[in-house]
Image: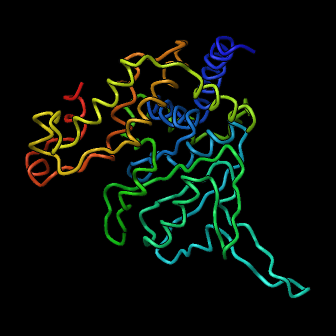
């Protein structure tokens, strides 16, 4: 199949997938879009929202519709790295045998990832970047495709450990979930308080997801679009000559080169699911807020004056 035909097929299957997900998840259209863009691009996503917004249900539904293995890890203060990666045990013949942990799955839901100490958070770093883990000196490859979809509660900070910048940077998107509208909440209550549970069909296989990721990599990008994406990231760095005025006033640290890479990958995927064969500047802008939100560190002045990260990012366009 040619790449043009593959993109056209992706548009159709993406719409079918969203329709299937909407049987369970009502509203949250932009959130689902960003999660799917991360998955098609081979990236990870961090979902930030208060309890009760169906973050866990959303990830579970998406994994079912994609036909992928799914494991949930509930992050708690006493969770150890071996609880995630697995550990070696002595079997009956006195030989060490490796028992795989929940990290060996296609989709990992890292629930409330900021509730566990940095030592355990760091256990995911190699898995997220290298798609492999090292336990007791032995190297184990993870099955592809592999995604970490993590959740975080932005309100309650007691007993939490903020994610280190190195780990935050490995998430392609940071996605903020808002409360549903009145009409959406009415639909949620109607659909969840009845007796007939809805089933989600699997529309993809693991092999098809890997092929979509390879297709996204092959999509051509014009030099001016790459320069635009790199230019936006450069403007987020307060010490740079190109820094925007708002950035110089309100930002301590800007985004790194991984943000530029993710902007282009995200723009390619955004173009493909909308039936375009090459991304333009609008595609970069469409994914920029989710990709840059967690890579920009505001200063105390921004906090005091109520300047949001989104306002600063939009000013860069």
Q: From this viewpoint, which residue is outermost toward the right?
A: 93
Image coordinates for residue 84, horizontal then vertical, percent: 61, 67
**In the visual, does 110 lie left or right of 49?**
right
Q: Quadrant of residue 88?
A: bottom right
Give the position of the N terminus as an image quadrant. Answer: top right
Residue name at image x 47 percent, y 19 percent: 221
**In the visual, does 196 lie left or right of 155?**
right
Residue name at image x 63 percent, y 49 percent: 107
**In the visual, does 21 lie left or right of 120?**
right
**Image: 124 above or below 184:** below
Image coordinates for residue 237, horizontal then vertical, percent: 21, 42
**Image: 134 above or below 4:** below
**Image: 194 above or below 203:** below
Q: Quadrant of residue 256?
A: top left
Q: From this viewpoint, which residue is outermost toward the bottom?
A: 94
- Its colouring scheme is rainbow
Image coordinates for residue 196, horizontal then vertical, percent: 69, 37
Please tell me which residue lies in front, 168 or 60: 168
Numbered marks: total: 0
């Amino acid at each position: 199949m040619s790449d043009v035909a593959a993109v056209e097929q992706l548009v159709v299957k993406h719409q079918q997938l969203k329709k299937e997900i909407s049987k369970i998840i009502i509203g949250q259209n932009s959130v689902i879009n960003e999660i799917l863009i991360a998955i098609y691009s081979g990236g990870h996503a961090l979902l930030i929202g208060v309890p009760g917004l169906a973050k866990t249900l959303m990830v579970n539904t998406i994994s079912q519709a994609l036909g992928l293995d799914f494991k949930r890890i509930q992050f708690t203060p006493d969770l150890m790295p071996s609880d995630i990666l697995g550990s070696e045990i002595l079997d009956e013949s006195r030989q060490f045998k490796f028992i795989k942990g929940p990290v060996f799955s296609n989709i990992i839901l890292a629930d409330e990832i900021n509730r566990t100490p940095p030592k355990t958070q760091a256990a995911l770093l190699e898995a997220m970047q290298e798609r492999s883990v090292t336990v007791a000196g032995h190297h184990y490859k993870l099955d592809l495709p592999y995604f970490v979809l993590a959740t975080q509660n932005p309100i309650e900070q007691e007993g939490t450990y903020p994610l280190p910048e190195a780990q935050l940077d490995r998430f392609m998107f940071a996605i903020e979930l808002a409360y549903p509208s009145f009409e959406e909440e009415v639909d949620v209550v109607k659909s969840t308080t009845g007796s007939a549970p809805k089933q989600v069909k699997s529309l993809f296989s693991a092999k098809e997801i890997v092929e979509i990721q390879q297709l996204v990599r092959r999509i051509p990008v014009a030099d001016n679009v790459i320069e635009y994406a790199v230019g936006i990231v450069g403007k987020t760095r307060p010490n740079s000559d190109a820094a925007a005025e708002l950035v110089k006033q309100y930002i301590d640290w800007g985004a790194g080169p991984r943000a530029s890479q993710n902007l282009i990958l995200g723009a390619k995927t955004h173009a493909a699911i909308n039936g375009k064969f090459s991304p333009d500047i609008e595609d970069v802008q469409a994914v920029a807020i989710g990709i840059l939100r967690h890579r920009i560190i505001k200063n105390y002045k921004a906090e005091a004056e109520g300047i949001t990260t989104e306002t600063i990012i939009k000013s860069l366009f």
